[in-house]
Image (cartoon, helix red, strand yellow):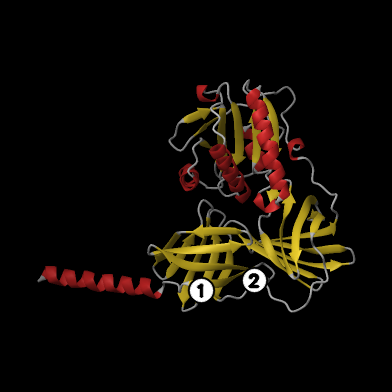
């Protein structure tokens, strides 16, 4: 009798759990998502829920970029969409064709209100013709009170605009939106960086704000200037006086200490990437390296990544590194150089032969004799168009020159 009662209990419990999961399954289809910035502005992006082999997927479109997130779980009354290898997650409740919840950076605890609804509606809409031509290059200055330089790269077709901002650290990846009269609206969402651009033309200058989720608003201005260029990325980070080599010893995800002075790296050209799993520009560079290795089978060329992680514990940091390795099938060592902080000043202490670390990623090219030949600060990703193409050509030439020496 007791066994029958127990069986009945589990049947009821299973039925209830199944009903809860069924209730909280989001409807499939295209959605318009909205995040709320710290001043109440709406940061929109488009995505689609679809099923493949009975697995729920979230497909995000950013201009020329398509991202797929497949780690989606129904937990109690919520839907949790994880975005590895980033520490970002969307947690929502489904109510018919509506989703309500939050976008959360788990390590920092920063939350941004999030909602979405079934819709084919674009991110931005306007019936006003564009009064601005944004085709070309724009000299940009962010944060005028403590300025740092940028370069706007945009393509416009009627009211539609797409492009990115290059900075010394990298780029803002794939922005897209509209020009309405004298105003500009663009946004993107890549899992790690929800960005919104709102700007207006005043005379010859365009002034605006770059919004980052709910905790940051950066003022900027820009002017058309097809001759403007940022400083050479190879001139921003240098070796300290008296150094011509680099060395380090850090753990891999198996707990083994790996050093550049190990036999497997001797008499080879070594590419050392300073990066983090939380950094989209680093992931763009990683994918470039993987494609380069796939197309170029050089036995005397090695890659090593040094990861600087925000995760508070070594265990969590190692899990993030292993997730990156697994997700992109990285064949070369990815070592944990630091956890608990991504502060570049702390990172520089791990590599004291450098005069500092100014950006993630930073990439160091070392010749077969162990001498540092080049240091690249930042990375111009695919969203930068010609800048990315120019870098790939320069990188290939330099690698082949070092291999021939």
Q: Is residue 396 left or right of residue 310?
A: right
Q: Position of residue 10 (x, y in %)?
A: 22, 69
The x and y percentages for residue 152 are 77, 55
Numbered circles on residues, count = 2
Q: Is residue 372 above or below residue 395?
A: above
* Relative vertical location of residue 87 with respect to residue 305 in this rendering, above or below: below
Q: Nearer the viewer, mark 1 or mark 2?
A: 2
| Residue under label 1 | 99
Whether residue 86 is visible, yes or no, is yes
- The residue that appears at 85% across and 54% down in the rendered structure is 225
Q: Residue at x 50, y 41 (%)?
A: 330
Quarter of the image where one finds residue 344: top right
**Within 10 angstroms of label 2, few (less than 14), some, or many (20 or more) residues?**
many
Q: Nearer the viewer, residue 120 or 262?
A: 120
Disc 1 element: strand
List x then y, in percent, for residue 148.
78, 50
* Residue furthest left as drawn: 1
In the picture of the structure, the residue carrying the numbered disc 2 is 123
Out of 1 and 69, give the one closest to the viewer. 69
Q: Quadrant of residue 271?
A: top right
Task: Choose top left, top right, bottom left or bottom right for residue 64.
Answer: bottom right
| Residue 204: percent from left, percent from top | 89, 63
Left or right relative to 90: residue 64:
right
Q: Quadrant of the C terminus?
A: top right
Task: Report crowding for label 1: few under 14, some 14 to 19, many 20 or more residues within 10 A (C-alpha).
Answer: many
Residue drawn 44% across the image and 34% down it: 255
């Amino acid at each position: 009798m007791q066994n029958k009662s127990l069986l009945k209990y589990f049947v009821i419990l299973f039925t209830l759990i199944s009903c809860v999961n069924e209730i909280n399954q989001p409807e499939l289809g295209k959605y318009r998502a909205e995040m709320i910035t710290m001043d109440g502005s709406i940061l929109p992006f488009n995505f689609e829920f679809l099923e493949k082999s009975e697995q729920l997927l979230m497909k995000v479109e950013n201009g020329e970029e398509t991202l797929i997130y497949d780690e989606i779980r129904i937990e109690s009354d919520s839907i949790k969409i994880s975005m590895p290898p980033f520490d970002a997650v969307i947690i929502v409740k489904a109510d018919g064709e509506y989703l309500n919840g939050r976008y959360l950076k788990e390590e920092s605890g920063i939350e941004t209100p999030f909602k979405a609804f079934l819709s084919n509606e674009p991110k931005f809409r306007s019936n006003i013709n564009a009064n601005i031509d944004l085709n070309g290059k724009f000299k940009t200055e962010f944060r005028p009170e403590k300025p740092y330089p940028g370069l706007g790269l945009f393509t416009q077709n009627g009211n539609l605009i797409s492009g990115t901002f290059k900075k010394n650290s990298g780029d803002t990846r794939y922005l897209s939106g509209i020009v309405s009269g004298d105003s500009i609206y663009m946004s993107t969402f890549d899992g790690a960086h929800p960005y919104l651009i709102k700007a207006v033309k005043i005379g010859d200058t365009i002034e605006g704000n770059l919004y980052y989720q709910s905790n940051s608003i950066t003022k900027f201005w820009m002017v058309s200037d097809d001759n403007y260029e940022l400083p050479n990325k190879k001139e921003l980070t240098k070796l300290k006086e008296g150094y011509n080599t680099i060395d380090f010893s850090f753990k891999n995800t198996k707990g083994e200490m790996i050093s550049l002075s190990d036999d497997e790296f001797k008499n080879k050209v070594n590419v050392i990437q300073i990066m983090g799993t939380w950094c989209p520009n680093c992931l763009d560079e990683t994918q470039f390296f993987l494609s380069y290795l796939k197309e170029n089978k050089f036995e005397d060329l090695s890659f090593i990544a040094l990861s600087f992680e925000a995760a508070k514990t070594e265990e969590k940091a190692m899990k993030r590194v292993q997730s990156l390795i697994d997700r992109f099938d990285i064949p070369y060592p990815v070592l944990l150089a630091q956890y608990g902080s991504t502060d570049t000043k702390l990172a520089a202490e791990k590599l004291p032969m450098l005069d500092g670390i100014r950006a993630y990623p930073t990439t160091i090219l070392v010749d077969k004799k162990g001498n540092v030949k080049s240091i690249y600060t930042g990375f111009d990703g695919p969203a930068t168009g010609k800048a990315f193409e120019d870098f790939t050509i320069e990188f290939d030439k330099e690698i082949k020159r070092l291999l021939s020496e």
